[in-house]
Image: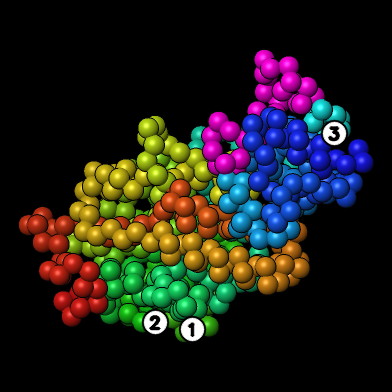
Amino acid sequence: MADTATRLTALAGELLGEELPVRVRAWDGSEAGPPDAPVLVLRHRRALRRLLWKPGELGLARAWVAGELDIEGDLYRALDLMAGLLWDRGRGPGRAVHPVRDPRLRAAARELLRLGGPLPPPAPPAEELRRRTGPLHTRRRDRQAVSHHYDVGNAFYELVLGPSMVYSCAYWEHPGATLEQAQHDKLELVCRKLGLGGGDRLLDVGCGWGSMALHAARHHGARVVGITLSAEQAAYARKRVAEEGLADRVEIRVQDYRDVSDGPYDAISSIGMAEHVGSARYREYADDLYALLKEGGRLLNHQIARRPEGDEAGYHVDAFIDAYVFPDGELAPLGRTLATLEDAGFEARDVEALREHYALTLRHWVANLEADRPRAAELTSPGRARVWRLYMAACALSFEHNRIGVNQILAVKTARGGASGMPLRARRWGSPDR
């Protein structure tokens, strides 16, 4: 046990069939591995027990959130180096506890179990959402999922997101822009794509802390209804509306999109909300929004997409994100989303991919969090601050490496005679003919 790190790296290499790409520091202070690589710090043998008990992402996440596992050095580089262990299916630490025929591998697995100490490990950290039961995406279950993610303290989100309080991909005219400018430009782009004008009625589905609703009312004279399932978000958004003197033009509701019945609206924005809908409900979502629009009305659907795979069934987010970040979240390929919107009656008029924009946005959020980690932990919990740091950094890399993307789909409820109300020149957003 005097040189635990050396033993751990040797055992991991045997089981994985390759050397660990990072340096390891064990709980006894020993270190082993590439000298110039980021350091994977195992602060307690409990971290190893968690990895052996739940191989792969969930075990790593539990050790990370509990503070038993850490990374010293460049977090992005460390995650990049370990990408094969974290994201490649069919590889990774899971092989360490699976039955194997090779006696040498069985011996290595037994040695890891001995180093980790008696199983089972401690209970999962308090930040983990416990096992859920019942059908996916009922109104009650969706409320619980949204509350888990968003009702963790508005002050914490202020620290991470900055003054804009926009929790979705920004739009970067150039990489040197500030986060605030890029978020302003994204909201303006959405309003221009929707062709908003004075008096137009806008439904903002998943309105968050009210930034889109305020922008549309303040800069375009729209009358806005914003809906969210988060009570904390709604209270924050209503306060902002009152402070800006826009209560006559902006209404914020705690309401499910399935319960909105006061259409027709001239336009609908859905920015970073559709990932919560689920594949089983997506056609219902599309039908409901179509019914709420007037003829000629526009929908702007801003949504994260996964790469197409052989199995086109519903695809849940990774185990770590499902347990700690976005419970019950599902990602669909762009093509399937477009097809469902068209099946509901929409005419798709424009698709803009913003994958690199989201990577840059996430890196800014991580920088905000890292600038004051003690304060972030104080505002929510040390474990949750660690959740957000890992989740946002890992997602930034996923966008950069094209594992996931994000797209704005502009669709129209075309009038019966075929009129779309769209300008003749594509992407002439903000032109006099709207």
Residue 253 x %, y %: 47, 63
Q: Amino acid at mark 3?
A: Leu
Q: Are marks 3 and 2 in contact (CB under 8 Å)?
A: no
The residue wearing badge 1 is: 244
* Distance between the alpha carbons at the discs numbered 1 and 2: 9 Å
Relative to residue 43, is residue 170 drawn left or right? left
Q: Are marks 1 and 2 in contact (CB under 8 Å)?
A: yes
Q: Please determine whether, in this image, residue 117 is positioned above or below residue 218.
A: above
Q: Please determine whether, in this image, residue 295 is positioned above or below residue 339.
A: below
Residue at image position (79%, 31%) is 112
The residue wearing badge 3 is: 115
Q: Amino acid at mark 1?
A: Glu
**Residue lying furthest front:** 35
Does the segment drawn in magenta span residue 80?
A: no
Secondary structure type for disc 3: helix
- Crowding around mark 1 (Cα neighbors within 10 Å: few <14, some 14 to 19, many 20+) is few
Decide which of 198, 33 is in the foreground and name it: 33
> What segment is highlighted magenta in the picture?
84-110
Query: Which quadrant of the figure has residue 109?
Result: top right
Residue 299 x %, y %: 29, 60
**Residue lying furthest left:** 417
Report whether residue 141 is seen: no
The residue wearing badge 2 is: 218
Q: Please determine whether, in this image, residue 15 is positioned above or below residue 5.
A: above
Report whether residue 190 is seen: yes
Q: Are marks 3 and 1 in contact (CB under 8 Å)?
A: no
Which label sits on residue 419?
none
Residue 213 x %, y %: 42, 72
Secondary structure type for disc 1: loop
